[in-house]
Amino acid sequence: MLKKTIVAAIAAISTLISVYSCNSIVGSPSSSNPLDSTENSLVDGQSPLKQDTVKLMDLLDSLNKGKIHFPAVDSLNKIEPKQAKKMLRDSIYRELNKKDKHIYLTFDDGPLIGSSAIDSIITAKNTKISAFLVGKHAGMSKRLKRDFDRYMNNPLVECYNHSYSHAANKFHVFYSNPDLAVADFEKCETDLGLKHKIVRMPGRNIWLFDDVRRVDLTSGSQTADLLGVNGYKIYGWDVEWKINGLSGKPVQSVEEIYGRIRNMLGNKSTLKPNNIVLLMHDDMFQNKKGQQLLSNLIDSLKQHKDYKFDFIENYPIKY
């Protein structure tokens, strides 16, 4: 796969190439406009490899990880490696900008007061969401059990694992014993009957799936790795709509969150380009003001025909 990726990169930046190894690229752009050559090689039907073989995002990932090397300036090659790298990245960005953008609305800590309102809003707006549930909450009252059932029975909601105890909000202690922490997640999965082995770790913005491993606080890293060994995928978030801990009301305005989503998708600063994960909490939306804010945010995002809402199990959607 790496060799195919590199070949695609060569085609994108040069018309005269020599491949010395799977980890290096040597060649000399002979086109009068190498950037045009880059653009042409990335459009349908003109790449030397099928687009389902080498994805734009895989090519960009290889570029960002330094797996694609550019020739030094010499008598044949007139383009500085730094410039060639920028040209390739800019060309990939232009092609990605033509593709759909995928938004993952994720809600943590449910079922809580606010869950039923979320369920009603997204049903009325036909919008997919991902709910990361706390097992203990589902059994705290008949009302919360009913809200849990609403989530589970709604085809627009996919339910995932946010632990059984939410670490009793003592995260450092919780993650100091990885075996007990994993057992807590397993209890949530069993008690709630969750069908996906997908986790968000309480108090941690950790990603662990496929070849991705990103850890924010090291105290959760051993638990994350053990979850991975046990077949779980872990998803964090790109942007958080924060709540006031006392009132449960959103801190940032709809306009601020909407702007951040737009900017991050535009400048490709999310973990995976064209994909953005928004974190929210169910108790943000327990009153009418908060519910209206959620409704307004969804309406703002739906203005864009190339914005698609999806479940976190499909993350990331690649091009």
Image (spheres, rainbow, N blue to C red):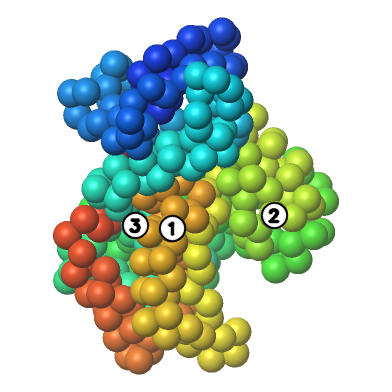
Question: Disc 1 or 3, which lies upstream in sequence?
Answer: 3
Q: Position of residue 198 (x, y in %)?
A: 49, 43
Image quadrant of residue 151? bottom left
Q: Residues within 10 Å of mark 2 (few under 14, many from 20)?
A: few
Q: Position of residue 173 (x, y in %)?
A: 81, 59
**The disc label shown at residue 267, or none:** 1
Question: Disc 1 or 2, which lies upstream in sequence?
Answer: 2
User: Left or right: 28 with respect to 8?
Assistant: right
Query: Label 3's element?
Result: strand
Q: Position of residue 230 (x, y in %)?
A: 61, 31
Q: Which amino acid is tagged 2? A: Asp
* Tag 1 and tag 2, C-beta contact below 8 Å: no
Circle 2 residue: 216
**The disc label shown at residue 103, or none:** 3
Is residue 199 visible in the rendered structure shown here? no
**The disc label shown at residue 250, or none:** none
User: Which callout, 1 or 3, points to the residue nearer the camera?
Assistant: 1
Q: CA distance from mark 3 to mark 2?
A: 22 Å
Q: CA distance from mark 1 to mark 3?
A: 15 Å
User: Which callout, 1 or 2, points to the residue nearer the camera?
Assistant: 1
For the point 26% across and 69% down, which residue is it?
Answer: 301
Residue 218 to residue 63: above or below? below
Image quadrant of residue 4? top left
User: Left or right: 151 with respect to 228?
Assistant: left
For the point 38% across and 59% down, which residue is it?
Answer: 266
User: Left or right: 169 with respect to 88?
Assistant: right
* Tag 1 and tag 3, C-beta contact below 8 Å: no
For the point 50% across and 29% down, which residue is it?
Answer: 78
Image quadrant of residue 66? top right
Q: Which amino acid is tagged 3? A: Ile
Q: Position of residue 131 (x, y in %)?
A: 41, 59
Q: Residue furthest front?
A: 75
